[in-house]
Image (cartoon, helix red, strand yellow):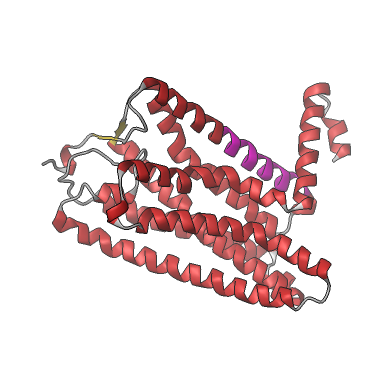
Amino acid sequence: MSNSSSITEFILLAFADIRELQLLQFSLFLGIYLAALLGNGLIITTVACNHHLHTPMYFFLLNLSLLDLGSISTTVPKSMANSLWDTRVISYAGCAAQVFLFVFFISAEYFLLTVMAYDRYVAICKPLHYKTLMGSRACVHMAAAAWSGGFLNALLHMAKSFSIPLCQGNAVDQFFCDVPQILKLSCSHSYLREFGLVMFSAFVLWWCLVFIVLSYVQIFRAVLRIPSEQGRHKAFSTCLPHLTVVSLFIITGTFAYLKPPSISSPSLDLVVAVLYAVLPPAVNPLIYSMRNQELKESIGKVIVISRMVVNTGKFSSTLQYW
């Protein structure tokens, strides 16, 4: 039995105890992390530099890439360092920071995906009112609301999780500090105080999911009424990437947090955590660029410009090309 006041560090769950497997895990995470940095960095650079992409859809996509970079940078580098140096320790302050940042980025991303569903609904179901409803000021306000909602949710969870007594030791059954794993260490009589906040957050996220589903019901009804096949294809092309990202995000997160205790195990929890915390930030840029010809062409220009800068060192010629 230990008290949270006496805990100065936590012990994270390791992927393997064999040195070769630890180095393999480090290499895999390094590849995924570099892919996430490259993909999201290209999207951020492309949207920021190309004035043709200064539209609500790409503005929200830029924000999504920033959140993806934040979420994967919260968990993966520490896990890579632990595998490389053969350690499992994280400080108390570091664990609290991981909880806050991960909940912040994940919550804000979920709220942003809800906003992006609304953007697609207005673009397809109310195209004549799109510029009015999705003006630049409205987009900034909605993005700010998503970030602020994630910040508030993270602040509440971090404060409540680390204010309750911890009586079950300091071994966290995950490769990063997460709220459910911290709650497993709490005293039984203190769990209910955080449980109420968890249920409130689940209630808010549930209504976001309902809003997304209802938006896409209206979107698909409107798309099916489009007479031309080319028009339907174009409408679906703008919606399917977002719908794919939402599905991946919700399915993996729901299974991670709501799976039956009877099938729970440390190895399964590790695999599921990778699926919802590590994989989506790396594959989201690929999902969005696969069916978006305009984005692919703009990313291609960014790559060509980068090569020109490296090869010639002349910035003026790149501006003219762009």
User: Percent position (x, y) of residue 218?
Assistant: 63, 76
Considering only vertical position in the picture, is 259 above or below 7? below
**Residue 47 lies within the magenta run:** yes
Residue 191 colored in magenta in the image: no
Outermost residue to the front:
263
Q: Residue at x 43, y 68 (%)?
A: 206
Closer to the camera in the image, 142 or 90: 90
Q: Is residue 93 left or right of residue 74?
A: left
Q: Residue at x 78, y 40 (%)?
A: 300
Rendered location of residue 31, percent (x, y) = 55, 31
Q: What's the residue at 72%, 44% (across, down)?
A: 46
Instruction: State the extent of the magenta-drawn residues as a range.
Output: 34-50
Q: In the figure, 285 relative to 145: above or below? A: above
Position above or below: 159 against 1: below
Q: Is residue 214 left or right of residue 311?
A: left
Dominant SS type (magenta): helix
Rendering coords of residue 190 (x, y %): 17, 56
Q: From this viewpoint, is residue 126 visible?
A: no
Residue 232: quadrant of the picture? bottom right
Compared across the picture, whether 89 is left or right of 151 comes to left
